[in-house]
Amino acid sequence: MQLYCESLTAYKRLKTREVRIGDLLLGNFNPIRVQTMTTTDTMDTLATVEQSIRCIEAGAELVRITAPSKKEAENLLHIKNELHRRGYKTPLVADIHFTPNAAEIAARIVEKVRVNPGNYVDKKKFEQLEYTDAEYAEEIERIRERFTPLVKICREYGTAMRIGTNHGSLSDRIMSRYGDTPMGMVESAMEFLRIARDESYHNIILSMKASNPQVMVQAYRLLVQTMEHEFGECYPLHLGVTEAGDGEDGRIKSAIGIGALLEDGIGDTIRVSLTEDPEFEIPVCKDLVKRYTQREAAITTTVPEIAPVTKLPYSPFEFSKRKTYAIANIGGGQVPVVIADFMLSHHITHQDLQAVGYTYNEMTDKWAIGDAAADFIYTGNKLLNFALPGTLKVLCDYNTWLQATDKEKYYPFFMPEEYLQQTQRSGTLNFITLDTNTPVADNILQAICNDSTAVLCLWSSHPHAMPSVRRFVVELINKGVANPVILAVESHDITIDEQLIHFSTDTGALLLDGMGDGTWLINDPSKISNNKVSGRTYLQTKNNHQFLNNTAFSILQATRSRISKTEYISCPSCGRTLFDLQETTAKIRAVTNHLKGVKIAIMGCIVNGPGEMADADFGYVGSGPGKITLYKGKDVVKRNVDSAIAVEELINLLKEHDAWVEEAVGVVDGE
């Protein structure tokens, strides 16, 4: 097994060096710290102070402020003094990108500086260049000469430093040797870390951020393994998914990337990057951290042990889908399916299916089917009294299935012993539920293995469900069992945000490792106390199905498992931003959200674009006050477009590259 964490089954924090940031201790089993970044103009001292206070009072333990030039770096002193005058001693972090001089000023003022190795010294022109070994070594020496002065200042002043690699900001030199890869991200940071260590400076935190959670998770795992192998120790890790976006999508993408690592004990501080006011990031951070604070406390109680994983049959550093055979539309090379849970519904009508992507027109007796339409609904002990749309199938309890007349639309759901005992089964699809926290009899597993119609619905009664399910899937792989797997997750959390985090972490972490041929999200809507998130309200009864269905498809989209909608890579805004990001993101979303599979980056300034939109098809980037530059991939297509017409010009760009389609009402199904 390739090591990247202490254990894949028992929750253990990764031991890291302890770093001091002002009076705050980070790493070495100290609490996981939460932080955010201001969005105000750094030269507006009062506005930055006021926003910092709102963040601190919301629970931020560090506040990051952009310092793009020397004047902003110098103004950090006024901001810090005013905060101290008001009684706030929370450590400040200067965010530096292109200006080493600004970093050297800031390092004498604030408690921590963040540098991005991809654009601190290195060239980043997105050209394909070849470097000989001698030329490569020469570039490293140039970095050493330019970076060492900052290291010495930080060591002298007791200032901490984050070496923060971003997936979209890799230099030409790194790209030439490693490509746009997690290994390239790791090496970019390691070059700077080696220089700091040579100067006996260790007050360092590292990060490996990407807008793609899969890339981000792989990079952090590789970084841990690389540090352990080269140094025999790890430095503290700052976790975050860049440009996650807003609303549910931003929370889901962040929870998948950050949560997948926290599950394995990796991470000492987190920031959830949302295209919202920064104080709204903190409750999401706290909800994430709370899961693992409780888990840490539970270690000393009676939480049962999960059997250890002794052999890992896949690489955790690159994506590989678990090989399964196809059963109808599940498994094989097909995209994961979505099962909508209607178990608690007393009566199911045509109208109820609208929440899961099917709209019925009574006048024409036709169905309109959306891109995010569930593939199955689970009805428990109920049969439906109306004809279903052609693409939708029903999953129901075994005894109920026996009463169904249409065996092409209805499929049985078995308990393990029930499956073994019954001889009447579907000739196409049979679903068997297994609790991965309970030993499965060999004869049951053998019967399933020999049944080319059997689909496993895996869940766990263990308090730490994800590692329990992962261990079971690893066992399936090691035993050569190739039946498709549905990931069933039930949340008992009482707020929408907590449920989003729960579903995203427990399902998304497994999908990132190629485990899962479908999702099945379950909750009890009567127990949800807070039914509003980011301005979107889900009623506790009628629209709970919509919430679960949207969440399932968003998780699949964020893990790149199934693309069903437009994806927005939207930065969280900061003092560099040249337009109202929240308003602009909403405007672009309103006119493009029907473009299935298109990735659009909305970046506030040149620091984030084109660098941070590495994964985007098209980019909308602030290039000056009232001016926008449009990108196709990383290539500039139109410069200095007036912001008044920029959205229209973006649509024209989409049309020019055949990425635009007119919005359709839906696909009509005659059944």
Image: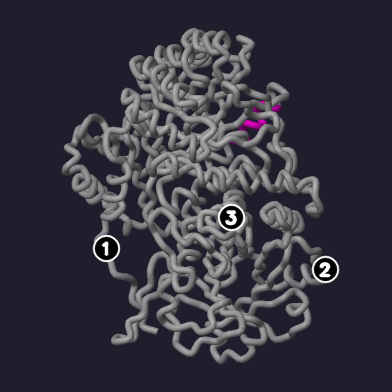
Quadrant hosting residue 20: top right
Whether pointer 3 and pointer 2 mark residues with C-beta atoms closer than 8 Å, the reply is: no
The residue wearing badge 1 is 663
Question: Which residue corresponds to mark 3?
Answer: 502
Query: In what element is the residue under mark 2?
Result: loop
Earlier in the chain: of badge 3 and badge 2, it is 2
The relative height of residue 109 versus residue 174 in the rendered view (above or below) is: above
Above or below, 488 against 317 in this view is below
* Residue 61, picture quadrant: top right
Q: Residue at x 54, y 35 (%)?
A: 182
Region rendered in magenta:
220-228
Q: Where is 137 relative to 11, above or below?
A: above
Residue 474: percent from left, percent from top? 72, 53
Which residue type does callout 3 highlight? His
Q: Is residue 610 visible?
A: no
Kindly report the secondary structure that dominates the magenta region of the rendered protein. helix
Q: Amino acid at mark 2?
A: Ala
Closest to the observer, 602 or 563: 602
In the structure shown, which secondary structural element does the residue marked by tag 3 occupy?
A: helix
